[in-house]
Image (tube, rainbow, N blue to C red):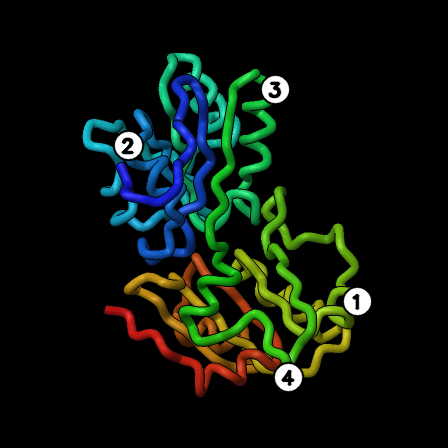
Amino acid sequence: MLDLPFDLPPFEAGTVWLVGAGPGDPGLLTVLALHGLRSADHVVCDALVDPRIVTLARPGAVIEAMGKRGGQASARQSQITDRLVGLARQGLRVLRLKGGDPFVFGRGPEEALALADAGIGFRVVPGITAGIGGLAYAGIPATARDTNAAVAFVTGHGADGELPEQFDWDALAKGAPVMVFYMGLGHLDRMVARLLGAGRRPDELVAVVCDAATPRQRVVETTLAGLVAAVAAAKLTPPALVVLGAVVGLRARLDWWRPQ
């Protein structure tokens, strides 16, 4: 279905592909993701996937919206995994389409484990995670030689809906010169307090990227101390990334993308 100088793996009946759709721009899909979309019988789609990507599915494929999105009504994870298992047992080629990368804060491991426990064959097709691709579209590199030799990707929203407490905030604040927070807007005030309490400077640069790599992308630059007020003033809403560190200062020269 694609004219390529190499073979792509067959999408076997009765199996599930867990496919990352990237952070937004349909052009960021991988060749393997596109191949899966053009082969699948049934696509189970997340809420954050760009609608233009769904139009790439094979004509006649069933498209089922079954996404999870914080703060909005959505299917329980158990319902989603049961649905994947049930469809595969019907002998269908099932594609689970997820925003970003399914194995980076995407609950892909839970779905893969459920498939493995049910004896369903599966393939993981990685996608570009928002913490890399989304920041790039905002003109912010995750790493730069003159600013940081390490970066931490952190969830701001734990399984219980609260700010995660299972890691050492002091160690995180001291050990990661750049931090990228996924799903961080819901507990922003507590997150800022934790970081300030762990020794991060109040004047440290922060950017918030909303709807990254989509025509709706918005970026707000501020400081750690001014973050909560800046987000409120701009009326920013999820999905959003929060990036803290000196790489934010490079955006003035690297802000290359203009949403159409």
Query: In what quadrant of the picture does the N terminus appear?
Result: top left
Nearer to me, 172 or 193 = 172
Check disc 3 and give the amino acid type: Asp
Identified at 32% across, 37% down, the residue is: 37
Amino acid at dot 1 = Asp
CA separation in Å, label 3 and label 1: 38 Å
| Quadrant holding the C terminus | bottom left
Residues packed near mark 1 inside 10 Å, few (<14), some (14 to 19) or many (20 plus): some
Q: Is 113 left or right of 78, judged from the image as shown?
A: right
Q: Earlier in the sequence, mark 4 or mark 3?
A: 3
Residue 63 - label:
2
Which residue position holds label 1? 170
70 or 23: nearer the eye? 23
Residue ID for mark 4: 146
* Residue 73 visible here: no
**Secondary structure type for disc 3:** helix
Residue type at mark 4 is Asp
- Spatial CA distance of label 4 from label 2 is 46 Å
Which badge, 2 or 3, is on the more N-terminal residue? 2
Tell me residue 224's x, y (percent).
60, 78
Depicted 58 relative to depicted 82: above or below:
below
> How many other residues sit within 10 Å of disc 3, few (<14), some (14-19) or many (≥20)?
few
How crowded pointer 2 is (Cα within 10 Å; few <14, some 14-19, many 20+) is rated as some
